[in-house]
């Protein structure tokens, strides 16, 4: 589930604008807006402060934004919270949403999910897609009120119809999981596809899996490849590995086997610590699939795959070692040690060292022609 509820990019002149305060006199908020756009933050701050003091809701909102993000002034969450509250009480939607974010994240106040939910809901009822997503997510996780999947779905639907990417993705998750009614993979795929087209890597991955397995749609290796590629190019490691497997196995009717592409994607994922990709990359070098056979590199990747948790790699490693001389084996072990040291330096909290055992395990092969 997509969960973070972040503050979007600054919105300088939220709509709709409230009525001008009766005592506004000659005050003109547009002077502050123009100064802000020109990056004359001192003039903007002065104008918004003047407006905020006479109760101008947009001025209050923009002044809060400047304090919250430390634009043209020292960051001050407490002051931002007060100003957002004044603006939100006058119905400014983005002030209501940002006030909800501050209570949600405990900025300028103690974290308070109930208060956050109230302000998110105020903005959601005015049609704000970000707020609708936030209300849906709080219902899903039981934050600020009891867990309520049907209510989460209702708000995700409202937001998703406005094109909100994370709502589209989460709606797909709810529909395929059966948390609200019977699982509906066909409808889930519709929303995953929408979110995928809006750039969600997780949605691209899920859509690819559904096309690869024929869940809720006719099976299509080519469609699976296209969606896996989109997610893989965004850096989703699991998608890189699955794309490698798809190319390595191939589909005679839909997608020809391509070991060069398989090696490319296994290599990208393997260097990020994916044990399955490391194992299959080792198979490619061990058998010379689309590349010159290299037992030392194969041995290195088998060893790394096992050390990263792919237990079946040890039997392949033992069989390969029987074909190698002592010097080549030592070279392979040194390469693995150097790789592991470099990876550990870059990812100190993610490395799990596994001692190579004496007994063997079952092997899994890449299909070959």
Image (cartoon, rainbow, N blue to C red):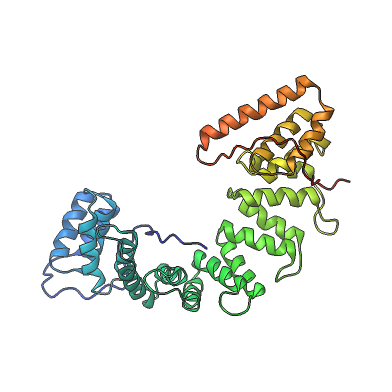
Q: Which of the 4 quarters of the picture holds residue 88?
A: bottom left
Q: Is residue 331 above or below residue 242?
A: above
Instruction: Say which quarter of the image contains residue 333.
Output: top right
Residue 170, position as x, y percentages in the image: 53, 67
Q: Is residue 119 left or right of residue 309?
A: left
* Side (left or right) of 203 relative to 74: right
Toward the front, the furthest residue is 358
In this rendering, the answer to whether 338 lies above or below 147 is above
User: Which residue sits at x=66%, y=52%?
Assistant: 229
Q: In this view of the protein, which residue sits in the foreground, 5 or 51?
A: 5
Does residue 265 appear anywhere in the picture? Answer: no
For residue 157, side relative to residue 225 (left or right): left
Give the residue at the far top of this rendering.
327
Please name whichever residue, 294 or 217, is drawn nearer the observer in this view of the structure: 294
Closer to the camera in the image, 241 or 336:
336
Can I make out residue 351 in this image?
A: yes
Residue 116 horizontal/vertical position (percent) = 33, 68
Q: Residue at x 13, y 68 (%)?
A: 54
**In the image, residue 174 lies at what x, y percent?**
56, 71
Choose top left, top right, bottom left or bottom right for residue 94: bottom left
Residue 197 position in % (x across, y down): 59, 62
> Is 62 situated above or below 333?
below
Q: Is residue 157 left or right of residue 120?
A: right
């Amino acid at each position: 589930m997509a969960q973070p509820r972040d503050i979007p990019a600054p919105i300088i002149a939220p709509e709709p604008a409230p009525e001008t305060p009766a005592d506004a006199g000659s005050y003109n908020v547009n002077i502050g807006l123009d100064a802000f756009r020109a990056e004359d933050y001192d003039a903007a701050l002065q104008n918004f402060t003047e407006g905020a003091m006479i109760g101008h809701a947009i001025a209050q909102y923009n002044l809060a934004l400047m304090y919250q993000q430390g634009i043209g002034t020292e960051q001050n969450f407490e002051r931002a919270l007060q100003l957002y509250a004044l603006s939100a009480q006058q119905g400014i939607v983005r002030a209501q949403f940002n006030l909800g974010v501050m209570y949600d994240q405990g900025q300028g106040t103690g974290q308070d999910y109930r208060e956050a939910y109230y302000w998110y809901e105020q903005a959601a009822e005015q049609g704000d897609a970000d707020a609708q997503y936030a209300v849906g997510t709080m219902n899903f996780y039981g934050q600020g009120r009891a867990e309520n999947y049907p209510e989460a779905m209702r708000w995700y639907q409202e937001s998703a119809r406005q094109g909100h990417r994370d709502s589209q993705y989460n709606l797909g998750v709810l529909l395929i999981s059966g948390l609200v009614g019977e699982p509906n993979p066909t409808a889930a795929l519709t929303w995953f596809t929408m979110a995928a087209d809006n750039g969600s890597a997780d949605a691209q991955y899920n859509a690819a899996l559904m096309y690869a397995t024929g869940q809720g749609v006719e099976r299509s290796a080519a469609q699976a490849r296209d969606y896996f590629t989109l997610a893989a190019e965004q850096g989703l490691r699991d998608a890189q590995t699955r794309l490698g497997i798809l190319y390595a196995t191939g589909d005679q009717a839909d997608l020809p086997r391509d070991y060069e592409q398989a090696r490319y994607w296994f290599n990208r994922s393997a260097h990020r610590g994916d044990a399955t990709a490391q194992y299959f990359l080792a198979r490619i070098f061990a058998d010379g699939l689309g590349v010159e056979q290299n037992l030392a590199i194969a041995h290195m990747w088998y060893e790394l795959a096992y050390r990263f948790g792919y237990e079946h790699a040890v039997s392949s490693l033992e069989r390969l070692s029987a074909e190698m001389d002592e010097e080549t084996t030592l070279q392979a072990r040194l390469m693995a040690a150097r790789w592991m040291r470099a990876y550990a330096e870059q990812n100190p909290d993610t490395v799990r060292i596994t001692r190579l055992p004496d007994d063997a395990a079952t092997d899994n092969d890449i299909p070959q022609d």
